[in-house]
């Protein structure tokens, strides 16, 4: 029989209370046994965490206990479910009846129906019973459970007391302690420390920045592009990695190091757990600006000495030289680390394809962000090496035709003919093998850069024939100096010492080759000196300079070591044994430059005499006679015209006019105008300024003329000569950055002794760290 609609609605409304009644009934049955034990175990674990006992356990043991607790709790719950089973509908109705205070069987009555049609009285009773049942609001009442073992034996008060004491002791650290106790990782973040080092690029010259973070913390840093980020994690067990824009690197040796290329958030993670977060951004970096500082000079070794002025906020990571002849442009790498300010570099362009040609030179400065700064161009005739050896001359001629674009087959036949001339190179197998290798590559090497690489091989063969390998030794020494210059900014003590050893060996090899070449020419110098044309350079002083370089490297004085290396480079570029073969064309240009320098000295003398005359006429004008001032105006204008004509004379000699010369001509024009108006004071000021500028220009012109004479074959510069960089005793002058020498007095000596004593005490103090004591030991080497 179908139940009435009210009865059906009542039964539908009772589904949820009956389901809840089943859950409560199961909990009441399990609480005295399984649920009570699970709750007790977890409360004990929480109390141990708040009291700090969980953190005392080794990480692996703590994770094992936590896992055992989880597995045990799950097992107890499964056991309770298996033992209790699913409460029957009758039991669930009975639990609701007890909770609501109903008579036993009332809810069962609603669910039932009469077996047969009742009479009037029975039907009324049935309806009344149904109406009373439908008025029931299902209630579960209080829990009906038997006391657990923990309650029976008084464990709950003890657990409550432990929880209260834990909260009092932990205070603000309570969340961290609980998180550590329930962490599935063997190492908690509480004991983890992260050290982040941001090392700027070497060209900046700034010290690294370091921050220390606690586990789970974050920080923001900004750095230049190409800065190196190094992350070290201490107190963490297990593998970890760093993830960020374009990087996902696993730790090796307890650290991760990577160049900063892109801004963004970098996360230190162990699996899915974040150890630390870093917000790294790229700092602003302006475009570098560079220009030439003074006129280029030519060293006795044939290299160009180029001064520059660099303006940049951090320094540049690369400096190159752009050589342009017509539409043909080629770049030559110079330095990899250049600080802002004034400086100079050396560039040996004698092997360059444009050697001997008039070209435009431009500095190109590139910073870490890839921004380029290009200097205004200057015109210069590149130095060209002259060879005395006939075979070397022939090889260089073939090389020039190869670079000019001659057919490979013609060049190959010419090289084969030179290789067949055994008497020309006295059967030297090295020369023969080099010529044959160049011939083979001309025939079979079809790469785009084959001509340049073959030309480089021919240049090496020619220079070996000319000087017995001195040029190759010089190139090796220059590379060793460049490697050490790069290492000073980023290398450790061991690598710097190894680079210094290689440089010392390269210098010894170069000096040895130079002496051998001088002996072969019949113009050898004593072993303890070096120079040319009667010059003498004390090689003992060279040893002192190298020892000073080593001391500065050992002491960690990077700036001083860089300066000492620059001084050493300048000295080695100045030293040359024997005499170079004369170059008639270069000698003619040098003579023309010397003649222009002499004419400039004559103009300087005329300007000085005219200024003296102006001063005398000014005295006469004070007595009312100013005719003499106006008479000086035409000679002053003539002197300015002669100066402008002299600028063209320098150009005809193939030498750039000294920079102060144009300003001097302008000052002469101002003086002529002041004289024409009778302004004695203004005329004398302009004449004095013109005289100073003429003197500077004359000094620069004489130095350039002498350098051209040396490069043309007059031998090495003599010590004490203008532009040589050496004083009359063969020691570096002020151009080497040595500065003035101050002899220490007794007070200075006592102060040095006190400093040494303090450093020795700190270096021998065992309570100090090894790094700190090493720092004091390095400082001791400076005293």
Image (spheres, rainbow, N blue to C red):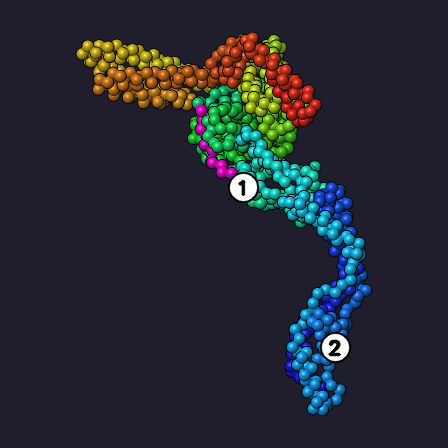
Q: Is residue 489 magenta?
A: no
Q: Nearer the viewer, residue 521 or 641?
A: 641
Name above or below for residue 228 compared with residue 90: above
Give me the residue at 71% from left, 74% from top: 102
Give the structural element (helix, strand or loop) at label 1: strand
Q: Which numbered marker is on residue 105?
A: 2
Give the structural element (helix, strand or loop) at label 2: loop
Horizontal side, residue 112 vs residue 517: left or right = right
- Identity of the residue furthest to the bottom in this view: 119
Name above or below for residue 323 compared with residue 251: above
Q: Position of residue 526 (x, y in %)?
A: 61, 9
Q: Quadrant of the N terminus?
A: bottom right
Q: Earlier in the sequence, mark 2 or mark 1?
A: 2
Which contiguous range is marked in magenta?
A: 280-293
Q: Which residue is mark 1?
A: 281
Q: Quadrant of the C terminus?
A: top right
Q: In the picture, residue 426 is in which quadrant? A: top right
Q: In the picture, residue 15 is in which quadrant? A: bottom right
Give me the residue at 69% from left, 48% from top: 164
Horizontal side, residue 204 vs residue 247: left or right = left
- Identity of the residue furthest to the left in this view: 624
Q: Position of residue 310 (x, y in %)?
A: 47, 29
Give me the residue at 73% from left, 90% from top: 117
């Amino acid at each position: 029989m179908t139940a009435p609609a009210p009865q059906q609605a009542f039964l539908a409304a009772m589904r949820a209370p009956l389901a809840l009644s089943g859950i409560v009934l199961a909990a009441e049955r399990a609480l005295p046994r399984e649920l009570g034990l699970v709750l007790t175990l977890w409360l004990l674990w929480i109390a141990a965490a708040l009291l700090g006992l969980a953190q005392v356990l080794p990480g692996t043991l703590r994770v094992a206990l936590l896992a055992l607790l989880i597995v045990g709790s799950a097992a107890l719950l499964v056991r309770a479910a298996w033992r209790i089973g699913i409460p029957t509908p009758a039991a669930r109705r009975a639990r609701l009846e007890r909770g609501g205070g109903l008579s036993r069987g009332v809810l069962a009555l609603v669910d039932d129906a009469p077996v047969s049609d009742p009479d009037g009285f029975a039907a009324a009773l049935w309806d009344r019973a149904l109406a009373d049942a439908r008025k029931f609001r299902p209630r579960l009442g209080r829990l009906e459970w038997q006391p657990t073992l923990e309650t029976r034996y008084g464990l709950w008060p003890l657990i409550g007391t432990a929880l209260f004491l834990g909260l009092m002791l932990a205070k603000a650290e309570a969340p961290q302690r609980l998180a550590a106790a329930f962490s599935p990782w063997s190492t908690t973040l509480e004991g983890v420390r992260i050290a982040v080092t941001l090392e700027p690029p070497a060209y900046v010259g700034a010290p690294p920045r370091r921050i220390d973070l606690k586990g789970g913390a974050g920080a923001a840093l900004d750095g230049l592009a190409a800065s190196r980020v190094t992350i070290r994690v201490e107190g963490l067990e297990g593998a970890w990695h760093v993830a960020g824009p374009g990087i996902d690197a696993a730790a090796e040796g307890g650290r991760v190091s990577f160049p900063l290329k892109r801004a963004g958030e970098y996360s230190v993670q162990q699996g899915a757990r974040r150890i630390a977060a870093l917000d790294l951004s790229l700092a602003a970096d302006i475009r570098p600006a560079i220009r030439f500082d003074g006129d280029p000079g030519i060293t006795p070794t044939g290299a160009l000495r180029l001064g520059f002025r660099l303006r940049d906020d951090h320094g540049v990571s690369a400096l190159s030289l752009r050589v342009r002849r017509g539409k043909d442009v080629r770049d030559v790498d110079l330095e990899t680390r250049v600080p802002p300010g004034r400086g100079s570099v050396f560039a040996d362009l004698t092997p360059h394809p444009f050697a001997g040609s008039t070209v435009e030179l431009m500095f190109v400065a590139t910073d870490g962000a890839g921004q380029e700064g290009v200097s205004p161009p200057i015109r210069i005739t590149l130095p060209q090496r002259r060879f005395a050896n006939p075979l070397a001359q022939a090889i260089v001629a073939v090389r020039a035709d190869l670079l000019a674009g001659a057919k490979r087959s013609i060049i190959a036949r010419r090289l084969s003919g030179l290789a067949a001339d055994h008497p020309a190179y006295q059967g030297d197998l090295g020369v023969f093998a080099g010529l044959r290798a160049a011939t083979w590559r001309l025939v079979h090497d079809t790469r785009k850069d084959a001509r340049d690489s073959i030309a480089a091989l021919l240049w090496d063969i020619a220079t070996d024939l000319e000087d017995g390998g001195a040029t190759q030794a010089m190139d090796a020494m220059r590379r060793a100096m460049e490697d050490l210059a790069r290492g000073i900014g980023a290398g450790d003590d061991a690598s710097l010492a190894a680079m210094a050893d290689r440089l010392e060996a390269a210098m010894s090899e170069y000096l040895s080759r130079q002496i051998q070449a001088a002996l072969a020419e019949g113009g050898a110098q004593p072993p303890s000196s070096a120079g040319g044309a009667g010059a003498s350079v004390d090689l003992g002083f060279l040893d002192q300079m190298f020892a000073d370089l080593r001391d500065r490297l050992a002491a960690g004085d990077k700036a001083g070591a860089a300066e000492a290396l620059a001084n050493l480079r300048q000295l080695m570029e100045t030293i040359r044994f024997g005499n170079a073969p004369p170059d008639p064309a270069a000698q003619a240009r040098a003579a023309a430059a010397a003649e222009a320098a002499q004419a400039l000295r004559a103009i300087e003398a005329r300007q000085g005499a005219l200024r003296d005359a102006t001063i005398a006429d000014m005295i006469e004008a004070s007595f009312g006679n100013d005719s003499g001032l106006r008479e000086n105006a035409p000679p002053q204008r003539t002197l300015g015209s002669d100066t402008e004509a002299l600028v063209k004379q320098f150009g005809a000699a193939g030498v750039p006019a000294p920079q102060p010369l144009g300003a001097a001509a302008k000052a002469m024009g101002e003086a002529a105008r002041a004289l024409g108006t009778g302004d004695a004071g203004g005329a004398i000021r302009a004449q004095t300024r013109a005289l100073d500028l003429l003197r500077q220009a004359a000094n620069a012109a004489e130095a350039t003329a002498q350098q051209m004479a040396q490069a043309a074959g007059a031998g090495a510069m003599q010590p004490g000569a203008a532009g040589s960089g050496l004083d009359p005793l063969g020691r570096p002058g002020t151009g080497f950055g040595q500065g003035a020498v101050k002899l220490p007095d007794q007070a200075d000596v006592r102060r040095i002794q006190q400093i040494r004593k303090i450093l020795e005490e700190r270096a021998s103090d065992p309570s100090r760290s090894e790094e700190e004591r090493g720092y004091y030991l390095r400082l001791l080497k400076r005293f």
